[in-house]
Amino acid sequence: MKVLIQGYSGKTGSEIYQLFLEKGITVLGADQEKDIFDFSKEDIDLIIDFSSLDGANKAVQMALEKRIPLLVGTTGLKEELMEIWDQKAKEKKIPIVILENYLLSMSYLKSFLRKIAPIFSQVEIEETHHISKKDAPSGTALFLKDSFPSSQNVQIISHRVQKYQYEHRIHLRNENEELEIIHHTFHKKAYAEGVYEVFLSLDLYRNTYGVIRERK
């Protein structure tokens, strides 16, 4: 098994790169200095992208040309762009997995929120990240918002601070009760572990073509 990671020298990409190496997987790395297409002659089984919009576009282009499954962790992608990718991936019969958040805990949290959504009339998602975080609201905040029906008014509040911070607070209220859920991430390795879990279940995605937005 050979995996190509686009953005392998970044904060999250480097953790994914290291974890996959520790698991005994052959890993290749592309970034701004080493173009992804330099590996076009390699026999690659999976592409992972944690880079930028330009990097994600390159990763999708290579995945389509070589018909290689792709996992995308780059956030801030436009719905219109993902619709185009979805159509092209279906034509090429490959899966493009795009999860706003690869953390295992977030997948379970989203499932829980869907179950309790009807109980609460007021929903507020408060997210805090480092100032280097470019998209606001974050992809995770939007991921959590998607747990609730479109008819439900969900307010998102975004904060950007100087120190490393990854926090999401979900406030749920009705006239009789209140529930608050707080989630912190202390290390980027948590994302790498979530990506690795998707990698392990890759066979579940192979017969599903197009853009996939939910973990299987």
Image (tube, rainbow, N blue to C red):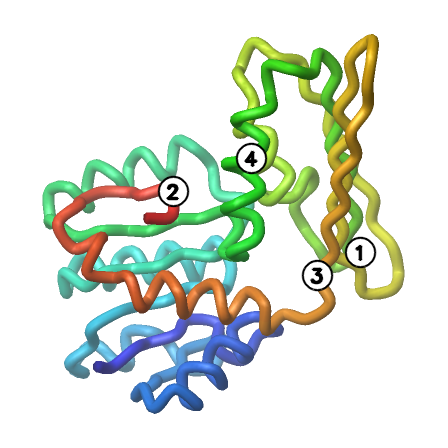
User: Where residue 91 sits in the image (x, y, percent)?
Assistant: 11, 42
Q: Residue 214 bears which disc, if any?
A: 2
User: Where residue 106 sits in the image (x, y, percent)?
Assistant: 56, 48
- Give the residue type that dot 2 points to: Glu
Q: Residue at x 74, y 59 (%)?
A: 132
Q: Residue at x 20, y 36 (%)?
A: 87
What is the distance, in whole Å, between disc 3 and disc 1 at their CAs? Answer: 16 Å
Tag 4 residue: 112
Q: Residue 146 bears which disc, if any?
A: none
Tag 3 residue: 185
Q: Is residue 33 above or below residue 50?
A: below
Disc 3 element:
loop
Tag 1 residue: 131
What is the distance, in whole Å, between disc 4 and disc 2 at their CAs? Answer: 15 Å
Front position among marks 3 and 4: 4
- Give the residue type that dot 1 points to: Ile
What is the distance, in whole Å, between disc 3 and disc 2 at their CAs? Answer: 21 Å
Q: Nearer the viewer, residue 158 or 182?
A: 182
